[in-house]
Amino acid sequence: MPISLHHLRDGDTPRWAVCQDGGWGELDGTLAGLLAVPLEQARAVVEAAARDARGDRPGRQVLPPVDEQEVWAAGVTYLRSRDGRKQESGHGSLYDQVYDSDRPELFLKSSPWRVVGDGDAVGIRADSGWDVPEAEVGLVLNAAGEVFGYTLGNDMSSRSIEGENPLYLPQAKIYDRCCALGPAIVPSWAAGPGPFRIGLRVLRDGREVFTGTTSTAEMARGFTDLAGWLFRALSFPSGVVLLTGTGVVPDADFTTRPGDTVEITSAELGTLTNPVVAVGAATSGKGRA
């Protein structure tokens, strides 16, 4: 990553920093501030900090690369995702329709305080027996809907809950620690428009139990198209992160377990690593064991 933005904490003080070629420089302000102004103005601020990036990292604790931004997500943007949803559900025609339609599936994934960063624990619901990570590219969009940058995302999902009834999607997708982002934001002018190749690995007791790769070139929809739909009737004065869907879906015989480690990797965007923990309380209700 030639240039990247990091959210860090030094003691009780969170801060944003730019890293370039191993040197670090602090940003005077917040991500919300950068995303509130036109892209060229934000670029000038970031590049000025990068030119002075010669110091040590200003904070040891890594925070998720958001401050005031909601996280939204797009579903069924890859053929493999459509097929996976049909496999888990008795309502397969719904996923055919959204994959082929002009209007995409968009949903709120997380408020900023539920997001975890690189190295922190991502969650699976304790009342779900079939859970998968979803490796995605996240668009960091400014208030005007322009692509300020990219980050990696893990849209953790309960396939048992969504598969039981598509109307349960919010419960399958939204809960504490449901979303991981990181390790940083790579500015759009530094990363280019893509496509980005994405790798997913799940480790259990140090052994690889799942691996897969995809490329954003396989998406049925483009980044700007998805961003345009998100902004049609919504405003985001502090910007927003939009996860763009997954093209890596494990087969039905795989589920993520507490104690696993999920790694999502892109040559351009870095590596996002998160241990897995159970969130909430198990119930005796329906769900795949």
Image: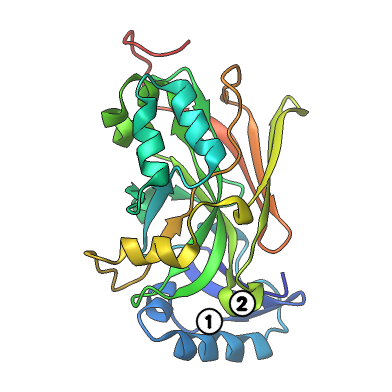
User: Label 1 near label 2: C-beta < 8 Å?
Assistant: yes
Distance between the Cα atoms at labels 2 and 1? 7 Å
Residue, disc 2: 18
Looking at the picture, does residue 28 appear above or below residue 188? below
Classed neighbour count for the residue bearing mark 1: other residues with Cα under 10 Å, few (<14), some (14–19), many (≥20)? some
Residue, disc 1: 27
Q: Residue at x 36, y 70 (%)?
A: 239
Q: Is residue 8 left or right of residue 202?
A: left
Whether residue 283 appears in this view of the structure is: yes
First in residue order: circle 2 vs circle 1:
2
Seen from the viewer's position, the closer of residues 146 and 223 is 223
In the picture, residue 172 is in which quadrant? top left
Find numbered disc 1 in the image and state the secondary structure of the residue it sits on: loop
In the rendered image, the residue lying farthest to the top is 284
Q: Which label number is shown at residue 7? A: none
Looking at the picture, does residue 254 appear above or below residue 152? above
